[in-house]
Image (cartoon, rainbow, N blue to C red):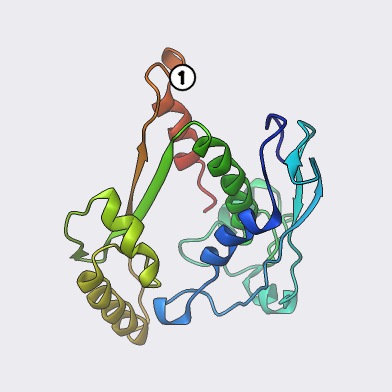
């Protein structure tokens, strides 16, 4: 559910589907093997191709569901996940399965909301770019927003430095064979933001962005 979107914004399911398709995992990038169609449906808030100002209801259905696979994890927390924290916080009543509150599936909703936000920002000439700049000890060369726009979707690691992307992919595969994992760094730009956005102190632009970045799932 997305509230606060003004009326009259042109919005179709394809606008959102484009970003959902980018979210789909790639096995050669060391991502999850779980596959979902992630076909978006607009249920409310859009009429004849434009937003109505009513809350926008978007939906994707989980189809590749194997809840039984998570049973063994209920009392065996995974490193790097919220299993233990959630168990303690909610007294063991948390949904530990693949569609629970701490699941990566929750990012589907974030992507859908972001797609709508992107459409709205573009009406004001604001553009958003992001790419992977480091995985493990491999760092990408410095790039421009134009480089990101041209190259970032030419590899599953979303790295605008195509040479570095190949080295990163090789490192991921070797690390997986060794039974280990790697961290990474993502860099983003927001271009053409009007001066004066945000409010002093707690509602600054930096403060609002920090809320999103630091509201970690895991």
The residue lying furthest to the bottom in this view is 177
Instruction: Tell me: 12 left or right of 18.
Output: right
* Residue 104 visible in the current orientation: no
Callout 1: helix, strand or loop? loop
Location of mark 1 (residue): 198
Residue that extends furthest to the front in the rendered view of this protein? 48
The image quarter in which residue 65 lies? bottom right
Residue at (72% x, 55% y) in the render:
94
Instruction: Relative to 117, say whether 200 is above or below.
Output: above
Where does residue 130 sit, x and y in percent of width and height?
37, 51
Q: Position of residue 135 (x, y in %)?
A: 28, 65
Q: Position of residue 128 (x, y in %)?
A: 41, 44
User: Quadrant of the rendered structure where residue 70 is?
Assistant: bottom right
Image location of residue 170, percent across then percent down:
27, 81
- Judge from the rendering whether residue 90 lies leftward or rightward of residue 202; answer left or right: right
Please tell me which residue lies in front, 99 or 206. 206
Snapshot quadrant of residue 183: bottom left
**Left or right, residue 149 beside residue 208:** left
């Amino acid at each position: 559910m997305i509230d606060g979107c003004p009326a009259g914004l042109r919005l179709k399911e394809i606008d959102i589907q484009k970003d959902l398709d980018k979210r789909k995992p790639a096995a050669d990038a060391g991502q999850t093997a779980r596959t979902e169609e992630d076909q978006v449906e607009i249920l409310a808030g859009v009429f004849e191709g434009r937003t109505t100002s009513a809350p926008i209801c978007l939906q994707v259905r989980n189809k590749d569901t194997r809840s039984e696979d998570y049973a063994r994890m209920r009392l065996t927390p995974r490193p790097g996940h919220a299993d233990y924290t959630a168990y303690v916080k909610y007294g063991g009543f948390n949904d530990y399965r693949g569609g629970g509150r701490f699941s990566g599936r929750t990012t589907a909703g974030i992507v859908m909301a972001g797609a709508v936000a992107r459409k709205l920002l573009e009406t004001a000439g604001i553009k958003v770019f992001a790419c992977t700049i480091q995985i493990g000890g491999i760092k990408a060369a410095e790039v421009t927003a134009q480089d990101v726009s041209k190259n970032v979707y030419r590899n599953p690691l979303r790295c605008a430095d195509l040479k570095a992307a190949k080295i990163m992919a090789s490192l991921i595969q070797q690390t997986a064979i060794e039974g280990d994992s790697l961290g990474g760094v993502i860099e983003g730009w927001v271009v053409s933001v009007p001066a004066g956005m945000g409010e002093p102190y707690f509602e600054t632009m930096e403060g609002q962005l920090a809320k999103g970045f630091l509201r970690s799932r895991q």
